[in-house]
Amino acid sequence: MTHTVLVTGVSRPIGARVASVLAADPGISRVIGVDTVPPPSLTREGGVSLGRTEFVRVDLRSPDIARVIADADIDTVVHMSLVSAPSRNAGRALMKEHNVIGAMQLLGACQRSATVRRVVVRSTTAVYGSSPKDPAVFTEDLEPHDGPVHGYAKDAAEVEAYVRGFARRRPDVTVTLLRFANFMGPGVDSPLTRYFTQPVVPTVFGFDPRLQFVHEDDAVEVLRRTATEDHPGTFNVAGAGVLLLSQCVRRAGRMPLPLPSPAFRMLGNTVRRMGLVDYSPEQLRLMSYGRAVDAGRLEAELGWRPKFTTGAAFDDYLRSRELRPFGGVPR
Amino acid sequence: MNVPDREARVIPITDAPSYDEPAPDPLAEALAFVRRRITGDYEVDEFGYDPELTDKVMLELLRPLYHHWFRVETVELKNVPHDSGALVVANHSGTLPLDALMLQVALHDEADRPLRLLGADLVYQLPVLGHLARKTGHTLACPEDADRLLRKGELVGVFPEGFKGVGKPFSERYKLQRFGRGGFVASAIRAGVPIVPTAIVGAEEIYPKIGDLASLARLLGLPYLPITPFFPLLGPLGLVPLPSKWMIEFGEPVHTDAYDPSDADDPMLVFELTDHVRELVQQMLNELRLRRGHAFPPFL
């Protein structure tokens, strides 16, 4: 059987890697990559080779995506295009439109399509929020006490609601929803990876949150497997174990700067206005209460577990940025 | 001379019967500890429990209080399972939850088992306290966390009286309050682990609560703000706990493995078992209190 796979968000590192891995799979006849911006060039901007992926520049918010799906007889859709941080010039409104309206358009097109058999959607563990009133470890079925009300996490929660609606209306399509912990690794560029490269890292006084990471290689492998095999359901994806923020800061050899939470919030708002980092009230909650998830369901379903633990993923990131603890050797 | 054509066999010195492991150099150990802490080279579990920090720092600070101030004595420690999951259910008293800390020292040092307490969400909202609670192995009192810990074979501790117990007036000492909604019993049934009824005698006398600044407490969002004979009269000095004599008794385990996990949804069974455990703890308290005698021996 021939497969034609559509991957959205291929101009970002993980999306590009997923597209290139799928393009290298002999069982897949065509890989079509879409994004709102062209992928970065290989030589100058450190882009990832997309292999034989055919790139189509489509704004997900427009109905053009429906034509791409219909014209190419797509049978598998991998939706990676979830923007986690508002870009400097576009802002939050555009990000929300991209995330939520984009997902609606894509799912609407899938619902119309007679050829789509499998839909894989990237989400985030941020949908669980962070709260002192919630269990320490989230499983997929848990309803969080304080669901996300801001930013990226709220977008993801809304996208998930549309995905569940789609799964209800098209029970013949295999729908996989993957809730990823924070990506970590040499190729990841996120607010969190930039945070740990600063010489002084602000933390919230009196709190030491538990953090969890998933290595980019493992993330790509999970997406490859779910895009090529049927694994319906919602799954947490995270490296085993947790790291405390204080542990991360020490391993990176950074100087922590504990600030009372109102000061942390003020600092966050200031740097956001200056366009330096993405900061939302969710971040303050994560930096106070932390979050850990149980990835057991994914392991049972795939019969495979992420190669990198949370600690190993962070160490790999540290090696790539040449960060080391005070007086220590690189890990 | 005929030399056997083979290499001499090397017998490691550690095989000698008189050989003792060289005592580790305490200074080198301390330096290694500091090095591990500075470089972040230690493990915490998914709840945030940091065994090394707990043993080497947190409990070390509590041990003088345990041995010399309260002179804690444990009874029937053999009733605590050595390596399997169990639920320790104890009475709660003393205005400030020092009984939780002493119970943790007792089980950690004398039964070699880390105690994973289930605490009120108030603790986890507060700065410093919340993350220290997690680092010393404790978590939020909710069925998900309790089930998860018990499934992993941990020793979980609960104080079902909650704030009603720890904040009760001195006149009601050693009278068990209502035992919550019995959620702990449901968790034990689901996991099929024994319940170890536990009586703590001595904590009632450390801060005798004779009054309550209720309106100020409400203003500060606290469950109560106690008046003791020395607090707030003597200011911070009033926070020094009175040196009462303590005893902790672990009772015969109540087994739950005869029930089906689905029985946890049977409210009548859960209520009956909760009442049964409550009566056991009350009985143990009465007997242990007699056995201890004076709260401040040898005079009072």
Image (cartoon, coloured by chain):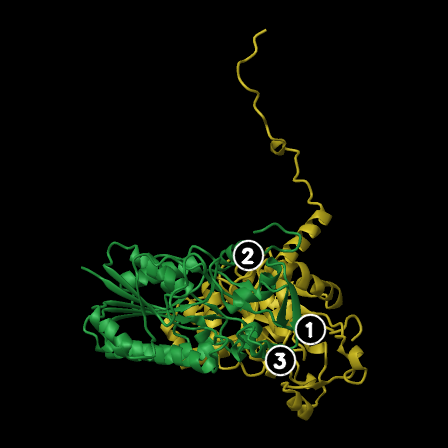
Chain colours: A green, B yellow
Query: Measured from the top left, where is residue B116 in percent x and y?
Result: 55, 67
Which residue is pictured at 61% across the width and 81% down the height?
A: B165
User: In the rendered view, does B190 fall on the left or right side of B167?
Assistant: left
User: In the rendered view, does A172 fall on the left or right side of B3?
Assistant: left
Query: Measured from the top left, where is residue A165 in percent x and y?
Result: 30, 80
Could you tell me the amino acid type at mark 1? Gly
Q: Find numbered disc 2 in the image and state the secondary structure of the residue it sits on.
A: loop
Question: Marks 1 and 3: in contact by CB < 8 Å?
Answer: no
Is residue A220 among what the camera can see?
A: yes
Query: Measured from the top left, where is residue B38 in percent x and y?
Result: 65, 57
Could you tell me the amino acid type at mark 3? Met
- In the picture, the disc for residue A277 is none
Q: Find numbered disc 1 in the image and state the secondary structure of the residue it sits on.
A: loop
**Which chain letter goes with mark 1?**
B
Task: Identify residue for label 1.
Answer: B202
Which residue is pictured at 69% across the width and 91% down the height?
A: B216
The CA distance from mark 2 to mark 3 is 29 Å
Give the mark toward the camera: 1 or 2. Answer: 2
Is residue B185 among what the camera can see?
A: no
Q: Find numbered disc 3 in the image and state the secondary structure of the residue it sits on.
A: helix
Residue reaching furthest to the top: B1
- In the picture, the disc for residue A266 is 3
The CA distance from mark 1 to mark 2 is 55 Å
Quarter residue B220 falls in:
bottom right
